[in-house]
Image (cartoon, helix red, strand yellow):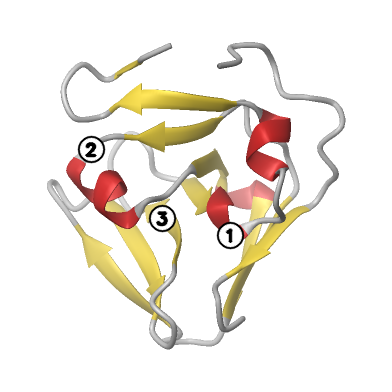
Amino acid sequence: MSTDAPQSNVALPITGSCHCGAVSFEMNAVPRYAVECNCSICRSLGTVWGHGQGAETTIHAAPEATIRYFRGEKELAFHTCRTCGSTTHWEAVKGEALGRLAVNLRLAEPGTIEAIGHRKFDGAETWTFLD
C-alpha cells in the first residue's frame, strides 16, 4: 500500500456516479489517498473514500435525490441514491470536519483508486492507518 503523495497521472476532474446516474460527482483535486475505513458504517457500505473540501467537489443531484443518514454524533451525513441505493458521498454538517466531504471512489472509473493509492484506515478502534 502506498503512503506516498498522490500520483500525478490522475486525471482531473475525478468523476463518478451512482448506478442509475441520478447522483454524480466531480472532484477537482486529487485526494491524498483513497481510504477504505473499517468502521461499522463504512464496512457495511463497502465504500472507498476520496476526501476533500466541499469547494473542490461538486455533487450533481436533483433535490431529494438522496437519502441522508446520520450516525453517531450526527456530524456526518451519508448520502445514498434514493433510486438505485448506491452510497455516493458524505458531507460534514457540524463539528471539526465542517466543510469537508468525501466521495465514494468505487463509483469512479476503474483504476482511479489504484492511481490515487489505496490505504486502509482503522476507524473501528485506533483511528490510525493500518499500513
Percent x, y of residue 59? 60, 67
Q: Residue furthest left?
A: 72
Q: Residue at x 73, y 33 (%)?
A: 115
Image quadrant in which the N terminus is located: top right
**CA distance for labels 3 and 1:** 13 Å
Mark 1, residues whose alpha carbon is within 10 Å: few (<14), some, or many (≥20)? many
**Residue carrying label 3:** 90
Q: In the structure shown, which secondary structural element does the residue marked by tag 2 occupy?
A: loop
**CA distance for labels 2 and 1:** 20 Å
Residue 60 quadrant:
bottom right
12 vs 52, nearest the viewer: 12
**CA distance for labels 3 and 2:** 14 Å
The amino acid on which the numbered mark 1 sits, given as a three-letter code, is Leu
Q: In the structure shown, which secondary structural element does the residue marked by tag 3 occupy?
A: strand
The amino acid on which the numbered mark 3 sits, given as a three-letter code, is Trp
**Residue carrying label 1:** 107
Percent x, y of residue 81? 43, 78
The disc at residue 29 is: none
The amino acid on which the numbered mark 2 sits, given as a three-letter code, is Cys
Which is more foreground, mark 3 or mark 2? 2
76 vs 1, nearest the viewer: 1
**Residue carrying label 2:** 39
Which is more foreground, mark 3 or mark 1? 1
Mark 2, residues whose alpha carbon is within 10 Å: few (<14), some, or many (≥20)? some
- Of labels 3 and 2, earlier in sequence is 2
Asked whether the residues under the numbered discs 2 and 1 touch, taking CB atoms below 8 Å apart as contact, a structural biologist would say no
Q: Residue at x 63, y 39 (%)?
A: 113
Image quadrant in which the C terminus is located: top left
Count of labels shown? 3
Q: Is residue 66 left or right of residue 57?
A: left
- Of labels 2 and 1, earlier in sequence is 2
Percent x, y of residue 32? 62, 26
